[in-house]
Amino acid sequence: MSCCCEFNGCNQGAKVLAVIFDLDGTLLDTERATRGVLNEFLARYGKELDREKEEKKRLGMTQKDSAAIIVKDYELPLTPDQFIKEITPLYRERWAKAKALPGANRLIKHLQKNGVPMALASNSLQENIEAKIYHHKGWKESFSVILGSDQVKSGKPSPYLFEEAAKKMGVDAVNCLVIEDSLVGVKAANAAKMKVVAVPSRREADCNGLANVVLHSLLEFQPELWGLPPFDDWIDDTLPIDPLHLSGLYVTGCLQEATGL
């Protein structure tokens, strides 16, 4: 993965006037916080989680699409809507514990301080977005627009979420930069004719060919490459960052990531 812009030219073409963020996996580590919820839910119906199958599923789907697949795959005696109604309270309990991903707070504060309009556009329902960011001080106030997939005709990979976010900010689509972690999100940004930075998980490595730039984390993001004000928080060539939260199993001298969905 690369944080340079030689192949597409970050600051070429229309000037970036606003930034649109995805939420889950981009700003907030909800996947780690909710690990084990699906397994716990399936056990209630005598079902066992198929880890290999779940690992292959595409990130960034709408809640309804994801629910329909799970109900079908595990032959649950529920409709997708019933599944959502039953499992959502379990997720909501865990969302309060979701940590900001490295560089997220820094970037949000920086753009807000410099008057760069920001929107949050997620395939989650709008009420779930509000619940997820509730415990993160200043986040809600930082975004002039917060949109969920239930507020547009269809969610990502359709362009409507990003197009509506730009419209509500009063900015043309070509002047928006999208920051995403999923392939469906990158495709949506492409469809909306917006520049896009991908910060994918290892499961979303195929973002590489579609995003303008691919980063390992938001700590690598360089605003000045997009014509945005540069960071001014370096202290004696040292970058001050929020604490990094790690969890896993300590085995034979190594920290290994714990599994579970």
Image (tube, rainbow, N blue to C red):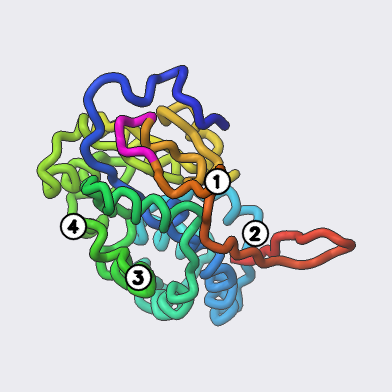
* Residue at 52% from the left image edge and 61% from the top image edge: 242
Magenta highlight on residue 250: no
Helix, strand or loop status at disc 3:
loop
- Marks 2 and 1: which is nearer the front? 1
- Marks 3 and 4: which is nearer the front? 3
Give the answer, above or below, for where 229 lies relative to 45: above
Helix, strand or loop status at disc 4:
helix
In terms of sequence position, does the residue under pointer 2 or pointer 1 come before the other? 2
* Residue at the disc numbered 2: 51
- Marks 3 and 1: which is nearer the front? 1
- Marks 4 and 2: which is nearer the front? 4
Q: Specify the segment rendered in magenta.
A: 225-230
In terms of sequence position, does the residue under pointer 3 or pointer 1 come before the other? 3
Q: Main secondary structure of the magenta part?
A: loop
For the residues labelled 2 and 1, the Cα–Cα distance comes to 46 Å
> What kind of residue is marked 3?
Lys
Give the answer, above or below, for where 252 lies relative to 115: below
Q: Give the quadrant of the N terminus.
A: top right
* Residue at the disc numbered 3: 137
Nearer to the camera, 161 or 248 = 248
Nearer to the camera, 20 or 67 = 20
In terms of sequence position, does the residue under pointer 4 or pointer 2 come before the other? 2
* Residue at the disc numbered 1: 236
Position of residue 144 in the picture relative to residue 206 (left or right): left
Position of residue 124 in the picture relative to residue 54 (left or right): left
> What kind of residue is marked 1?
Asp
- What is the x, y in percent for residue 23? 38, 56
* Residue at the disc numbered 4: 151
Helix, strand or loop status at disc 2:
helix
In terms of sequence position, does the residue under pointer 1 or pointer 4 come before the other? 4
